[in-house]
Structures are given as C-alpha cells and as structure tokens.
Amino acid sequence: MPKDRLGIGFVGSGFVTGFHLRALVGVRDADVAAIASPTREHTEAAAARANQLGVGDPTVCSTVAEMAHDPMVDAIWICAPNDTRIAVVEEIADSVSEGAHLIGVACEKPLARNVAEAKRMVELIEQTGLLHGYLENQCFSPALMRGKEVLWRRAAPIAGRPYLARAAEEHSGPHMPWFWSGAKQGGGVLNDMLCHSYEAGRFLLTAPDESRDALTVTEVSAQIESLKWSRDEYAARLKDDMGVDYTRTPAEDFARATVRHKTADGTTVLVEATTSWGFVGPGLRLRMELLGPEYSMQVDTLTSELQVFLSRRITGSEGEDLVEKQNAEQGLMPIVPDEAATYGYVEEDRHMVKSFLAGEQPSETWYDGLAVTEVLMACYLSAEQGRVISMPEPALDTFIPAVARGEWKP
C-alpha cells in the first residue's frame, strides 16, 4: 500500500542539515524520523531543532545502520562530510541486504570527491535497488525554475534554444574546517561550489522535456588560483580559526570554468561558471544568467526585496541572521527573507519527498551527480595541465587532483 508520508533520516547534524530542517517546514508530507552523526551533542541539538520547528520528533541514532533499520525511517538524506560518503552508503547497502525497508536515498552535493568514488557510490545504490536523489538545491531555486519555465515557453519556441548559461557563487569562506581541507573535501572552492554553478547552468540549458544528458559535454577548460587565503595574514587567520595550514597544503579559493556541450542536433551551448571564497560583501551571492538569440534572464540573490540600514551606533555580536555568510552587522544590508526557499531547499526537498512516495526517480539522480563529478575532475585536470580537455577523457577514472593529494602549489 502506498505511503502518504515519508519518514526521513539524516546522516549528519551540521550546517546543511539545518537548512533541510528549515526547508521541511514547507513540505507537508514528510517527517524527520531520525538523525545520526558522530557527535552525540550535535545530534541531540539537531533533533531538538527539528522538534522546535515542528517537523518531527527524531530518534537520536549512534550509527547509520541503526537508522536504516528504524521502522519509522523510509528514506535517508546523506549530509555528512565528503570523505565519509562511501562508508555511509556501504552501511546503507549492508542494512538493505539485511532486510532494512527503505524507499530511497538522497545525497548532498557533490556526490563524491572524484570520479572513482562517484562511480562506487552509483554502483552501491544500484545494488540496493533504491531510488536515489542528488541534492543540488540551486536547480530548485524558485527564481531559476520560474525564469527557465518562462523563457523556454515564451522565447525559445520562437527564437531558438538558449546557448549560454552563466552561474557564479561567491562568499568569504566555508563554516567548518573539513571544507578547507583538500584531502577531506576533495579540492577547494571548485569541488565545493562549482558543482552548484555548473549544474545550475546545465539545468537552464536543458529543455523542460529533455533529460539532463541531452547535452553532451565535448570540452572543458578551467583555471584555479589561491588569491586570498594563501596570503600570510589570511593563512595565519585560517590556521587560528580552523586549524588548517594553507602555507603547507593550500586549496584553491577561486575557480572558473567553461564547459562546451553539443545538443542532439549538433548545436553548441556553453556553461560559464565562476566560484570564489574571496568575496567580501554582505554575504553569500548567487548570480545566474541565461542568454538566447532574442532573450535573457538574470538572478542575483543579494538584490533582495528587503533591506535594512544600521548606523555605526548599532553594535552587537557577529552572526548570520540577515544572510548566509554574513560579513557585516552595520550599514545598508540586504536580507533574504527565507533563505531555505530562495536557495532551493524547500522545492528540492518537496520534489524528493513526492518522488520517493510515488516510487519514481527524482529529476536529479546520482547519475547526474556522477556527470557533475566528471566535469569537476576535468576542470582540475585542465587547470593543472593548462589545456582544454576533450571529453570523454579516460584518465578521469583514476585522476585525483593535486589539491586533494596535498601537492598543489599556487
């Protein structure tokens, strides 16, 4: 008998889990049933937050297996650090083979640290027979979804399909130490954020009635740099704040890429993506554009409908109560009224929940996560070798970026 509510178990109790908890306030047919993470205190705090928000009264679990076997858990959201992903999915797969009754598994971006790991993730989920969703929230941003719908409905049928998508994500740096570690995270800002920007661009360039693989990647070119955080002053600050030494093992804090695709009829379309951990402004900035023969669209999350001004006499503690990655507490400040909605988490979680309850694969699957990982690794290879990478590139199957190996020198 089909279920009418989905019990979700979260692996991880950190920053992105918090966003999903807030997002689930806007999802009517799901409950947070369990949370598991290595630190009991953090897990209990996340469970208390879920209860406070009214999205569930989750069980605090010590292991992924305990969660997978919980009869109240129907699906698992993987929000754990990148270097733990395979172990988490192996534990899920073992639990399913032992009789755990799950419907699906959703995994936060990026799917893995490299192509070999991404292929292993796909192999494991295929063995379970479970549905799988790739949690790429920017593809579910209401502004992006609405802009795409309007242009593909009103403009593309008359003038022709769009040919250029630009996407950028910038802020002043990650929240947690593991994000700054090339080995644990799989790279720097390219792996952390260009995964967002590339998939947002690919989403915009794909027609509503096309699958995402209707665009074939033909060439990738990229550049990475450490522009800010390897400077002596900032490297010292990073070491004090995060315990990460960028004088020894730096990761890139700037990345740009151009990805060329061919459509089914041979038309060339491009994604231009730029990401940075060196943006000092009000906070996180997402900018997207779509260009076609006679039309265009643009999104900028810091062009907000709400702004406040605080004079220099208004002082207080630092925080992120106005916008994610907030850098100031005074002056003219934009406020994103509902970040979980604006950034796409609400629509993303709603879509995943409805897909799993209907027994259908979501629009973003682990196959998309693998495709994105292949492009990210091609970007690193291009940056390291200073050349355009023609795709497919067999070397990507075993390629580990120098940043992830701790051997990159800016």
Image: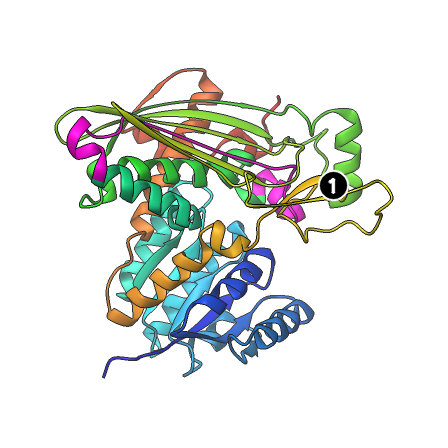
Q: Give above or below for 107 relative to 38.
A: above
Q: Nearer the viewer, residue 275 or 63?
A: 275
Q: Where residue 127 sits: x, y (%)?
A: 28, 62
Residue 200 relative to residue 242: left or right: left
The C terminus - image quarter: top right
- Which type of secondary structure does the marked residue at label 1 adopt? loop
According to the picture, the residue beneath numbered tag 1 turns out to be 328
Q: Amino acid at mark 1?
A: Ala
Q: Quadrant of residue 26?
A: bottom left
Numbered range of the magenta stretch:
154-183
Quick check: 366 above or below 279? below
Residue 308 seen in the figure: yes
Residue closest to the eye, 361 or 404 = 361
Q: Is residue 24 left or right of residue 245?
A: left
For image coordinates 53% across by 50% down, the residue present is 83
Numbered disc total: 1
Q: Residue at x 39, y 73 (%)?
A: 95
Q: Residue at x 28, y 53 (%)?
A: 363
Q: Going by the picture, which residue comes out furthest to the top?
A: 386
Q: Along the line of sight, which residue is nearer the eye, 290 or 223? A: 290
